[in-house]
């Protein structure tokens, strides 16, 4: 893939829809299935991923000319781990309330496939500015996916939304369990694909 | 060969840069982080004793920390407790040494200020000065005795036990008859939404009010949590529970000696917490009894 020709807005939209990390790229399924049990969990993890993605993308695109091609992946991992540690430390020191809720998730991010993949595919071939916007797009795309999954799972599984009781009863506990995560991710992928097919058909007819 | 050297150098430099960045961040954040943790623990302790924003702790309330050490004297093992004591010129600390049967052996006066006593390192230095060479001792745990004036009101016992994945750090509050006053999960890595629910009020509060005899044989049952009990557990400690005083009393009486209702989908985590609380309470009840006897036998002027 050569350097991107997309504008910054296109890059952000690309991350949110066309190449949504969870529903289109099917990356980082582990957190998508395991952690998206509630809206708050999804949102917090999304915010953390957004920061790590943006920082790592910028770092890698800055130093891309100095990375030895044979040790690309170790360098990416090192970069991600460094930023995760820094964010972990800063959160613990200055935002103790947020850290209490997010602490466990932040350390998990080191192993997220989406971040390494974006560094490999995008950041090491593009400018810092483009990588920054790509990171923003991917981060928000991931957050959007997690919140969408979290909303359905929380409402159907526990009858609550963001911790507030909306249904008054628990319809199906199954949705909180990891198996339902897979089920739901598959279902939402189908919805994404269907919408895309319809959209393309309309676009064809229009032209 | 040249490539290997190149790669080695590149990786070394990257690691050094990353290390420097993390190091600098650590230097800037370490103090604030420590302070947060200290504050957090303090808040947890007050919350367990029933004090909070709406009900501030009275100034007479004092939390005395007692640190337990294992001391090696030759090939014999000893237990050592660092306790706050009354001295001629105010308050200080002493180190009480017992044998493994709980018999009082000796006590040393320690030269340490209250601020220093909070730090692991400073405590170690002070102990080094009084213990005979070669002093071999190891920090074991800390317990906290809450006193209102001269009267003992409660105990706070921090502890750690294995959960579903890794260790769970928790703290329990006990009254002077070892009835459980409160449980707080301080750190855990259970699955969010499943075992992670151990931090929720409707699980934690099930332990509250259990007398020592019930705690000793507590287990979990795999039954759904009854609706009225859940409502009571969730509203515990809040003003508006929607239940009348009579209903509350009835629920308390009915469930006081019942086992713990396991979390749905997280029986192992639930059982781990139950066993952990059980073990912590039993060990503590045993230790404090021995310490009290030893302190009496040695006429140590303790503050609690």
Image (cartoon, rainbow, N blue to C red):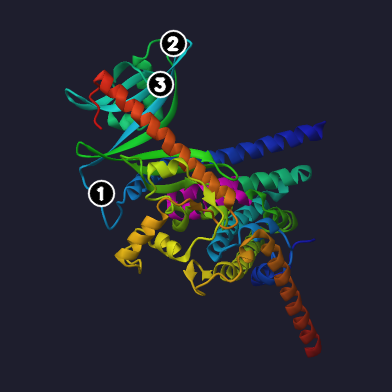
Residue stretch in magenta: A82-109
Q: Main SS type for the magenta part?
A: helix
Q: Earlier in the sequence, mark 2 or mark 1?
A: 1
Label 1 crowding class (10 Å Cα cut-off): few <14, some 14-19, many 20+? Answer: some
User: Between A169 and B42, which is closer to the camera in this rendering?
Assistant: A169
Quadrant for residue A152, please give it. bottom right
Q: Is residue B166 visible?
A: yes
Query: Disc 1 on helix, strand or loop?
Result: loop
Mark linked to residue B134 = 2
Residue at x-position 39% and y-position 48%: B210
Q: Chain of mark 2?
A: B
According to the image, label 1 marks what residue?
B57
User: Between B292 and B237, which is closer to the camera in this rendering?
Assistant: B292
Q: Earlier in the sequence, mark 2 or mark 3?
A: 3
Using residue A44 as the reference point, say whether residue B94 is left or right of it. Answer: left
Query: Disc 2 on helix, strand or loop?
Result: loop
According to the image, label 3 marks what residue?
B79
Q: Is residue B70 above or below residue B10?
A: above
Magenta region includes residue A97: yes
């Amino acid at each position: 893939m050569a350097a991107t020709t997309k504008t910054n807005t296109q890059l952000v939209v690309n991350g949110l829809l066309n190449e949504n990390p969870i529903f289109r790229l099917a990356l980082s399924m582990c957190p998508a299935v395991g952690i998206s049990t509630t809206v708050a969990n999804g949102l917090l993890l999304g915010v953390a991923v957004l920061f790590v993605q943006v920082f790592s993308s910028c770092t890698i695109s800055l130093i891309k000319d100095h990375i030895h091609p044979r040790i690309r992946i170790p360098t990416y991992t090192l970069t991600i781990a460094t930023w995760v540690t820094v964010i972990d430390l800063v959160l613990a020191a200055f935002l103790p309330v947020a850290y209490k809720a997010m602490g466990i998730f932040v350390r998990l991010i080191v192993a997220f496939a989406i971040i390494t993949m974006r560094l490999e595919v995008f950041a090491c071939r593009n400018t810092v500015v483009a990588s920054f916007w790509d990171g923003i797009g991917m981060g928000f795309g991931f957050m959007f996916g997690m919140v969408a999954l979290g909303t359905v799972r929380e409402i159907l599984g526990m009858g609550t939304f963001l911790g507030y009781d909306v249904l008054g009863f628990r319809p199906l506990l199954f949705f909180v369990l990891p198996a339902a995560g897979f089920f739901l991710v598959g279902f939402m992928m189908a919805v994404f694909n269907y919408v895309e097919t319809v959209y393309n058909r309309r676009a064809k007819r229009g032209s | 060969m040249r490539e290997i050297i190149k790669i080695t150098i590149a990786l070394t430099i990257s690691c050094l840069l990353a290390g420097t960045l993390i190091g600098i961040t650590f230097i800037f954040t370490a103090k604030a982080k420590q302070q947060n943790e200290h504050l957090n623990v303090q808040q947890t302790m007050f919350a367990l004793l029933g004090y909070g924003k709406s009900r501030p702790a009275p100034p007479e309330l004092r939390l005395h920390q007692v640190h337990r050490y294992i001391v090696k004297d030759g090939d014999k093992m000893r237990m050592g407790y660092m306790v706050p004591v009354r001295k001629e010129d105010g308050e200080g600390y002493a180190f009480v040494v017992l044998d493994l049967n709980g018999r009082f052996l000796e006590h040393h006066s320690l030269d340490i200020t209250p601020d220093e006593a909070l730090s692991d390192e400073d405590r170690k230095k002070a102990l080094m000065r009084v213990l005979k060479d070669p002093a071999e001792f190891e920090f074991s745990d800390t317990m906290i005795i809450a006193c209102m004036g001269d009267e003992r009101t409660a105990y706070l016992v921090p502890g750690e036990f294995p959960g579903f994945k890794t260790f769970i750090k928790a703290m329990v509050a006990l009254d002077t008859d070892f009835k459980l006053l409160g449980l707080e999960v301080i750190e855990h890595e259970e699955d969010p939404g499943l075992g992670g629910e151990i931090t929720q009020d409707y699980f934690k509060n099930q332990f509250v009010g259990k007398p020592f005899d019930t705690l000793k044989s507590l287990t979990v049952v795999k039954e759904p949590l009854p609706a009225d009990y859940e409502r009571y557990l969730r509203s515990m400690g809040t003003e508006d529970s929607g239940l009348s005083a009579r209903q509350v009393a009835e629920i308390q009486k009915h469930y006081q000696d019942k086992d713990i209702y396991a979390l749905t989908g997280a029986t192992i985590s639930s059982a781990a917490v139950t066993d952990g609380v059980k073990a912590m309470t039993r060990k503590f009840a045993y230790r404090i009894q021995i310490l009290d006897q030893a302190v009496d036998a040695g006429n140590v002027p303790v503050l609690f």
